[in-house]
């Protein structure tokens, strides 16, 4: 699995749970 895909999935997972106040 490409590292970029791992990061994308992790980011999507975290964002689906909650959006960090410091995001962006």
Image (spheres, rainbow, N blue to C red):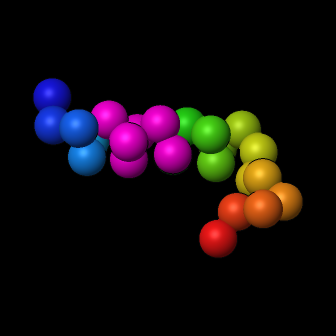
Residue 22 inside the magenta-drawn segment: no
- Quadrant where the N terminus is found in the figure: top left
Residue 7 occupies quadrant: top left
Q: Quadrant of residue 3?
A: top left
Q: Residue at x 64, y 71 (%)?
A: 24
Q: Residue furthest left?
A: 1
Left or right: where does residue 2 sit relative to residue 6?
Answer: left
The residue depicted at 62 percent of the width and 39 percent of the height is 14
The residue closer to the viewer here, 20 or 15, is: 20
Lateral position of residue 4 relative to residue 12, left or right: left
Q: Is residue 20 above or below residue 22?
A: above
* Residue closest to the far top: 1
Magenta range: 6-11
Q: Main secondary structure of the magenta part?
A: helix
Residue 22 location (% of width, % of height): 78, 62
Nearer to the camera, 24 or 16: 24
Above or below: residue 23 compared with residue 12 = below
Q: In this view, does 12 lie to the left or right of 21?
A: left
Q: Where is residue 9 in the image (x, y as percent from the top left)?
A: 40, 39
């Amino acid at each position: 699995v490409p590292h970029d895909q791992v990061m994308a999935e992790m980011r999507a997972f975290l964002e689906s749970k909650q959006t960090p106040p410091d995001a962006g």
